[in-house]
Image (cartoon, coloured by chain):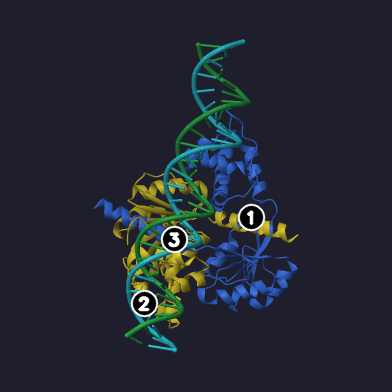
Chain colours: A blue, B yellow, C green, D cyan
Amino acid sequence: MNKQVSKRTLSRLPVYLSLLQEKYREGMEYISATTIANLLGLNHVQVRKDLSCASTSGRPKVGYATDVLIKELQVFLDYNNTKNAVIVGAGDLGKALLGYNGFTSYGLNIVAAFDNNPDLAGTSVKNKPIFAMEKLPRVMENMDVHIGIITTPAHTAQAIADLLVKNGVMAIWNFAPTSLKVPASVIVQNENMATSLAVLSTKLNEKMENDK
Amino acid sequence: MNKQVSKRTLSRLPVYLSLLQEKYREGMEYISATTIANLLGLNHVQVRKDLSCASTSGRPKVGYATDVLIKELQVFLDYNNTKNAVIVGAGDLGKALLGYNGFTSYGLNIVAAFDNNPDLAGTSVKNKPIFAMEKLPRVMENMDVHIGIITTPAHTAQAIADLLVKNGVMAIWNFAPTSLKVPASVIVQNENMATSLAVLSTKLNEKMENDK
DNA sequence: TATATATCGATAAAAATATATCGAAAGGAG
DNA sequence: CTCCTTTCGATATATTTTTATCGATATATA
C-alpha cells in the first residue's frame, strides 16, 4: 500500500468515497470491489487495485467494512487535515464556489474571495467575505493560505497567478480557460469546463450520426 | 485524419483552440506544433498527433496557419452547430452556469434553468429564465433540447436524470457528486470537482512532505 | 544553385493504464 | 467436517497513451 499512486487512481478515489458514504447511509455495512465496480461501471480488478493503495481492510468472501474503508480513504486523501484557500475573481463562478460549503468535507476551507470591482469589496456570500485586491497579501499571510483558486477571465489569469505566487501560494486551482506559467514548485490543476463539454458534445454528435 | 479519436486527445483540442484564438488575436499568423507544445507544457509529437485528427493544413518548416487551424478545430468540435441545453437546479452553481455566456462559443446554448424552489420560479439570470419544474417537459419539447445539465444536490440527481431521459435528453452533463444510472443510449459526462481537488490536494501534500 | 534547418507526418519504442488469471482465505451449504 | 463459492491480493497479459525516431518537404541562406 501507498506506493506510487497513479493520477488516474487518485482521481477515482473521491468517487469511491462518495459512493461509499451514500451506501453507508443506506445501511450497507460491507461492500465488495465487485459491487462497487458494478455500481460505477468499472472493472472490479481496477477497483480493488485502486483501493489497495489506501486500504488494507479487505477480507476474502466478505469485502470491505464500509465505515472502515471510508475512514481509510479520508485519511489517504487527507480530508481531515483542512487547508485554507482564497478565490480570486468574485464573478458568478467565484461566488458559487465561495458559497459552496461542500468543499470542507474534502479538506478545503475557502476563507475569502478577492475582486477588483469596488462594488463587491465589503460584501459577502454566506458569511464568506469578498475583499478588494489590495487586501490579498495580508489575508493570505494572516490566514496561512497556500492554495489559490482563479475564477477570473482568461486574460487576467496570468497576472493573478503571478500575484498568488508572490504571496506564497503552493497550489493553484485554475478555472480560467488558459494555461498558466508558474515556477516548477507551484502545482497547477486546471479545471477546464470546455474540455468536458467537448467530450460530451462530440459523443453526442457521433450518436446522432449513428442514429440517422 | 478523423479515425478513432481518443478521449484524451479530444479533451486537449479545446485547449489548443483557445490558445490559438489568443495567439491569433495577438497577431501570430503561423504556429508550429513545437510552439504550441512549449506554451502548454506538452510534447510536440503529441500536439501534432492530436491536431492531425482535425487538421490537414500543417506544412513542413512553416507550421499551421493559425486562422485555418482554428476553423478546422471549430469544425471538428462542431462548435458552429449550436445545441440547446437546460439546467436543473438553480442554486449557486446552476445560476453561475446559466449566467455564463461563454458556452455559446463552444456550441452550447443554455436556454433555461429549472428549480423546485417556488421563490425562484419566474426569476431570471442575465435574461435567462428560471422555471418551476413542471414547465420542464414543455420547454424541452418546444425548444428542441437534448442536453441536460444537473446541478442539484447528489440525492436528487438520479430522479432528475430519470426525468430528463423521459423528456428526450440524449446527453447529461452531471455536476452532482454521484453516479447516474441511465439507458445505454444516453451519454453522461461527469464533472466531479472533488476529483480535481483530490489530485491537487495530494500533490500538495507530497510537496509539503518533500519540502520538510 | 547547393546546403542547412525547421517542421510535418508516419512508424516504432516506451511508459502508463486497464484487464485477466491464479492461488489463498473466509464463510456458507450440504 | 468437507466441499463450494465469493472475494481478496498478487502477478501476468493486453491495451491505451505517450514519447522518440526517421524520412520527406518547404523555406531561408550562402
Residue C29, x across and y down, in percent: 51, 16
For marks 1 and 3 on the same chain, the one whose residue lies earlier in the sequence = 3
State the image quarter where residue B3 is shown: bottom left
How much space separates mark 1 and mark 2, taking CA atoms? 39 Å
Query: Residue B202, which numbered label?
Result: 1
Residue B33, x across and y down, in percent: 44, 71
Residue A131 visible, this orientation? no
Position of B76 relative to A19 (above/below):
below
How much space separates mark 2 and mark 3, taking CA atoms? 21 Å
How much space separates mark 1 and mark 3, taking CA atoms? 23 Å
User: Would you say the residues marked 2 and 3 are in contact, meaning their CB atoms lie under 8 Å apart?
Assistant: no
Instruction: Using the image, name the chain to which the residue with label 3 belongs.
Output: B
Instruction: Using the image, name the chain to which the residue with label 1 belongs.
Output: B
Query: Residue B11, which numbered label?
Result: 3
The residue to which callout 2 is attached is B67
State the image quarter where residue C4 is shown: bottom left
State the image quarter where residue C23 is shown: top right
Amino acid under disc 2:
Asp
Which quadrant of the figure contains the C terminus of chain B? bottom right
- The residue under the point 57% across, 49% down is A14
Task: Please tell me if label 1 and label 3 are on a single chain.
Answer: yes
Q: Closest to the observer: A168 or B156?
A: A168
- Which secondary structure lies at badge 1? helix
User: How many circles with numbers are drawn on the protein?
Assistant: 3
Task: Please tell me if label 1 and label 2 are on a single chain.
Answer: yes
Q: Closest to the observer: B2 or A114?
A: B2
